[in-house]
Amino acid sequence: MDFSFARPTADFELGVAHRLVAAAELAYRRREEVEEVMIRQFHLPRFVFFSDKGTQGYIASDRDHVLVCFRGTESTDIRDWVTDANCELVPGPLSGKVHAGFYDALACIWCSLDREIGRMDPDGKKTLYVTGHSLGAALATLAVARWLDQGRPVKALYTFGQPRTGDNTFARHFNLAFKPFAFRFVNNNDLVTRIAPRSFGYSHLGTFKYFTEKGDFKEEISWWDRFLDSWQGRMDDIFDGGSDAIKDHRIAIYRARIEALLPPILSISEYRHQVRHRRLARRRAA
């Protein structure tokens, strides 16, 4: 499959969402496999992997684009991660307060990450995309916030299954600066999107993109409709014998939901038929 980036034509692009959810899923694989896919399918020949004290991800680039992807939390680790989560708020970027554990995790790799971005794009003229799933989504958001503070241009942030990352002030300042270019995908009952708690002062940010229990895509949904949809997911899960909140967090499901929205890929024969049809129509019009 070809995941190469085209010139952006709009703030939100489904094709970009598809590329970035694939990149976020790829972050859970071995370094060698990630690098191979970045080169062969994303056509991003320059690749750097980063890892320090559990914070992992990669950077890939070509002459026009830079992609930064943070690795998240696998479904098998979520229960322990939620139980051990440190929800303390500490001073962070954009004059707000952010999750202490997330900010510490970003700090482990920040200097080397920011230095490498400066090497790949010293003038800030390349199109910079940032993405991540789960914990990786929180780290991606904090990285974008730090680059906003520094004045480095960022084209877009796409996150999947993102926990709340900062307080109301952080969310408000982030939205004022970047909401039209930050897209936060939530799949039905995804547990991780409901932590850290609002009661601790946390708030979500970015432009909300929601998948219902049946996989329908909603860009605007009322609180009541979302509650009913969430309840339907839980009721269905009783009969399926699983944990809906955990299953809905899987990056593979986010990717499947997004791929279901894409137009079908034409076979070679279908493509040739359409080309012949368009040529014939142009001749008749002439």
Image (cartoon, rainbow, N blue to C red):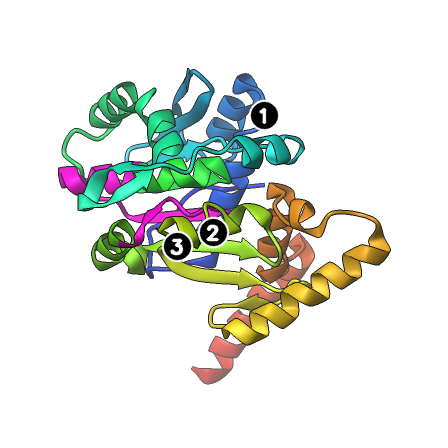
Displayed quadrant of residue 270: bottom right
Task: Residue at 59% x, 51% y: name it.
Answer: 190
Of 167 and 245, which appears nearest the observer?
A: 167
**Residue, disc 2:** 17
Q: Is residue 237 visible?
A: yes
Of 255 and 125, which appears nearest the observer?
A: 255
In front: label 2 or label 3: 3
Looking at the rendered structure, the secondary structure element under dot 2 is: helix
Q: Is residue 150 found inside the magenta-colored segment of the image?
A: yes
Q: Is residue 214 visible?
A: no
Badge 2 crowding class, 10 Å Cα cut-off, few under 14, some 14 to 19, many 20 or more, is many
Highlighted range, magenta: 143-168
In front: label 3 or label 1: 3
Which of disc 1 and disc 3 is earlier in sequence?
1
Task: Residue at 49% x, 34% y: name it.
Answer: 85
Q: Position of residue 241 (x, y in %)?
A: 84, 49
Q: Is residue 174 above or below residue 58?
A: below
Task: Residue at 42% x, 34% y: name it.
Answer: 69
In the rendered picture of this protein, how many numbered marks are placed on residues?
A: 3
Task: Residue at 68% x, 66% y: name it.
Answer: 231
Q: CA distance from mark 2 to mark 3?
A: 19 Å
Residue placed farthest to the front in the image?
A: 199
Question: In the image, what residue type sits under mark 2?
Answer: Ala
Q: CA distance from mark 1 to mark 2?
A: 19 Å
Displayed quadrant of residue 75: top right
**Residue, disc 1:** 29
Q: Which quadrant would the N terminus be assigned to in this image?
A: top right
Q: CA distance from mark 3 to mark 1?
A: 28 Å
Residue placed farthest to the bottom in the image?
A: 285
Q: Is residue 206 above or below residue 150?
A: below
Looking at the rendered structure, the secondary structure element under dot 1 is: loop
Numbered mark located on residue 204 in the image: 3
